């Protein structure tokens, strides 16, 4: 139930990777046959990644993770456009975008963070206003990791491009769950991460549209045509290629099955805990696998511990912020009242989630909520009766 944090490596992916830990361990940069045969597999994987997003293989750069892809795009824009540029992002981005943007803000860059409405959708009026400044680099997400809310990327891209801006999109959560197509949406750069789509942790992608100005983040050797130095992580690249191939097959089936399971979970929990429960985010434009629910007057962290004891993995806010007791920056930006925001839980499903998994969570949650509300000094008696 925590697949936005990471996903199971698909058995087919492990199988595809195996030979590259055993016999095919050459360096793809080597001139000899031993390296060359490995290089061919790297190029084959590059073509599969490109196919998933409608790119040309030459536009795909392999990185170590989504975080590196985001940092590369943002640091590169800062270097290319300098302090006269404006950097535009949103308040609900992942830390892998907010971190580098805020660091640039501290060093004198003009950084604008767009607000979102109560459904988690960005303020496009603010975007248009921010774009009155040139040059302008916009970095924003396709889908939110905490709420699953899908941004209107087509519209955002249209606005940014007609204002002459450059657009980077963090599609780490969207890829594999939605059609993410750079041949249909004019983004300049786009980040992906392997471990969100059933490939291993430690492999990512930065798509860079041909003709886009680019500066490498990692310097050293000439790998990736001088755009990302460092010997390629061949087994993981091959695994990612296989995962992208599988993602394409699953996308063809459509989101129906996953969305139905997610809706069964959400409805089941609301029926079981009828009062003091909220679903956070735009229910009409959400990833099919995600629901973010708030249980009033209790701590999300406490719910997590109880769920974990029962063998259920979920997340409060997001996996990356759950070490701290702070309310999620995403829910805060949406204006979710504190008594709800503190009790938020994200359930995120995958193609491996079953109806039994969902029903088990529905069966276990009411007792947890009841127990925690009984301990809460704020919880009204009627909410303790569930
Ligand atoms: N962007 C988003 C929206 C994410 O959800 C995540 C990970 O949770 C990242 C970026 C970072 O990706 P990675 O874990 O591959 O560094």
Image (spheres, grey):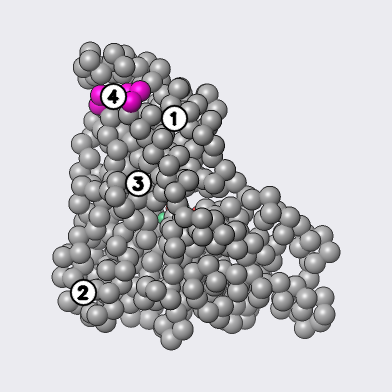
SS for callout 4? loop
- For mark 4, does the 10 Å Cα neighbourhood hold few (<14), some (14 to 19), or many (20 or more) residues? some
For the residues bearing labels 3 and 2, Cβ distance under 8 angstroms: no
Alpha carbon separation for disc pair 1 and 3: 17 Å
Tell which tag, 3 or 4, sits nearer the viewer.
4
Tell which tag, 2 or 4, sits nearer the viewer.
4
Point out the tag, 2 or 4, that comes first from the N-terminus: 2
Tell which tag, 1 or 3, sits nearer the viewer.
3
**Which residue position holds label 3?**
147
Point out the tag, 1 or 2, that comes first from the N-terminus: 2
Alpha carbon separation for disc pair 3 and 2: 27 Å
**Which residue position holds label 1?**
304
In reply to whether residue 182 is colored magenta, the answer given is no
Q: Position of residue 122 (x, y in %)?
A: 24, 58
Residue 342 sits above or below residue 367 on the image = below
Start-end of magenta stretch: 271-276
Point out the tag, 4 or 1, that comes first from the N-terminus: 4
* Residue 112 lies in quadrant: bottom left
Tell which tag, 4 or 1, sits nearer the viewer.
4
SS for callout 3? loop
**Residue positioned 41% across, 82% down in the render:** 212
- For mark 3, does the 10 Å Cα neighbourhood hold few (<14), some (14 to 19), or many (20 or more) residues? many
Tell which tag, 3 or 2, sits nearer the viewer.
3
**Residue positioned 44% across, 69% down in the render:** 181
- For mark 1, does the 10 Å Cα neighbourhood hold few (<14), some (14 to 19), or many (20 or more) residues? many
Question: Which disc, if any, is residue 131?
Answer: 2
Point out the tag, 1 or 3, that comes first from the N-terminus: 3
């Amino acid at each position: 139930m925590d697949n936005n944090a990471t996903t199971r490596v698909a058995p087919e992916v492990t199988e595809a990777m195996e030979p590259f830990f055993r016999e095919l361990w050459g360096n793809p940069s080597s001139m000899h046959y031993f390296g060359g045969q490995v290089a061919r597999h790297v190029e084959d994987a590059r073509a599969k990644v490109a196919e998933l997003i409608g790119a040309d293989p030459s536009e795909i750069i392999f990185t170590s993770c989504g975080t590196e892809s985001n940092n590369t795009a943002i640091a590169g824009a800062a270097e290319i456009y300098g302090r006269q540029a404006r950097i535009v992002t949103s308040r609900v981005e992942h830390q892998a975008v907010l971190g580098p943007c805020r660091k640039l803000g501290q060093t004198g860059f003009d950084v604008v963070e767009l607000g979102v409405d109560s459904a988690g959708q960005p303020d496009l009026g603010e975007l248009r206003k921010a774009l009155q400044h040139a040059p302008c680099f916009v970095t924003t997400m396709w889908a939110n990791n905490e709420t699953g809310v899908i941004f209107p990327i087509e519209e955002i891209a249209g606005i940014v491009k007609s204002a002459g801006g450059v657009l980077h999109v963090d599609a780490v959560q969207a890829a594999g769950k939605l059609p993410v197509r750079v041949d249909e949406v004019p983004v300049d750069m786009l980040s992906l991460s392997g471990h969100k789509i059933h490939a291993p942790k430690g492999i990512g992608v930065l798509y860079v549209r041909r003709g886009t100005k680019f500066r490498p983040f990692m310097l050293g050797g000439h790998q990736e045509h001088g755009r990302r130095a460092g010997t390629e992580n061949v087994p993981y690249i091959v695994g990612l290629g296989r995962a992208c191939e599988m993602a394409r097959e699953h996308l063809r089936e459509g989101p129906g099955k996953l969305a139905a399971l997610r809706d069964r979970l959400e409805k089941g929990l609301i029926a079981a805990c009828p009062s003091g429960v909220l679903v956070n985010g735009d229910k009409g434009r959400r990833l099919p696998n995600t629901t973010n629910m708030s249980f009033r007057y209790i701590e999300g962290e406490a719910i997590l511990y109880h769920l974990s004891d029962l063998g259920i993995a979920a997340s409060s806010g997001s996996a990356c912020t759950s070490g701290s007791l702070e309310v999620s920056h995403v829910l805060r930006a949406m204006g979710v009242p504190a008594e709800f925001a503190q009790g938020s839980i994200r359930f995120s499903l995958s193609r491996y989630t079953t109806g039994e998994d969902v029903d088990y969570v529905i069966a276990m949650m009411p007792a947890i909520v009841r127990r925690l509300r009984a301990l809460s000094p704020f919880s009204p008696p009627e909410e303790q009766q569930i």
